[in-house]
Amino acid sequence: MKTHSLRHRRGFTLIELLVVIAIIAVLAAAGFSAGTAAVNRAKKLKAQAAATAIELAINSFKNDYGYLPDPSGSASEDEELTTDSKDLLEILLGTEDESDDMANPKKIKYLSLKEGKNDKDGLIYSTDGSDVEALYDPWGNPYTIVLDYDYDEQVETPGATATTLNGRSAAVYSPGADETEGTADDVKTW
């Protein structure tokens, strides 16, 4: 009888090692894509909350004063404004310069949002921090606001697929991450 001595293997073969590395790579890729999707959903939720806060601030202003905040002081038909201009933001924040024709003479703070960074995700202030400059969504887009300055309780939504909203004084919109209007990632208050 022949006796065979069995060698005790130590470690992994090259094939086993490559299989383990491949499995780890697949799991890491799946985790990364799930993580990216979660971050995008969180950004969209933040943008939606900010858009809703803007609309609520406008409606609260109208309830208190009986008119909509009008940076020009002379609007008579529905108008689109964007939050990359500070005029409407100053009215809603109660930080307008003192004058006889102030839209918010009681200086009530209707809008409360966090400060953004790098022109993204919040209110952007001047370099000395004293004046608001703009408000941007998490992707760096300004919000578009349509205000019912003819007071017919109808607002036409912005964008390529415009529709008329009845019973509204304001509508707020952002094109989302892809910066393209009318796509699934749009942020809107209607």
Image: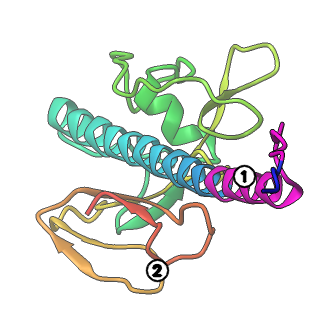
Q: Amino acid at mark 2?
A: Gly
Magenta segment range? Answer: 5-28
Residue 54 left/right relative to 154: right
Q: Position of residue 89 (x, y in %)?
A: 51, 35
Q: Is residue 122 left or right of residue 59?
A: right
Q: Is residue 12 magenta?
A: yes
Mark 2 neighbour class, 10 Å CA radius: few under 14, some 14 to 19, many 20 or more: some
Q: How many marks?
A: 2
Furthest residue in direction bottom, as rendered: 161
Mark 1 vs 2, N-terminal side: 1
Q: 8 left or right of 168?
A: right
Q: Nearer the viewer, residue 20 or 64?
A: 20
Q: Is residue 129 visible?
A: yes
Tell me where residue 95 appears, x and y as whole percent.
Answer: 51, 20
Within the magenta stretch, is there residue 34?
Answer: no
Residue bearing the label numbered 2: 182
x 82%, y 51%: residue: 4
Q: Is residue 45 above or below residue 80?
A: above
Residue 1: which numbered mark, if any? none
Residue 79 is situated, as x and y percent measured from the top left of the image, at 43, 65
Residue 120 picture quarter: top right
The kind of residue tagged 1 is Val
Residue with the mark numbered 1: 20
Q: Secondary structure at mark 2?
A: loop
**Relative to 50, residue 18 above or below:** below
Q: Which residue: 22% across, 34% down?
A: 60
Front residue of this view, candidates 5 and 21: 5
The answer to whether residue 102 is seen in the rendering is no
Image quadrant in which you'd find residue 146: bottom left
Q: Residue furthest right?
A: 14
Q: Secondary structure at mark 1?
A: helix
Quadrant showing the N terminus: bottom right
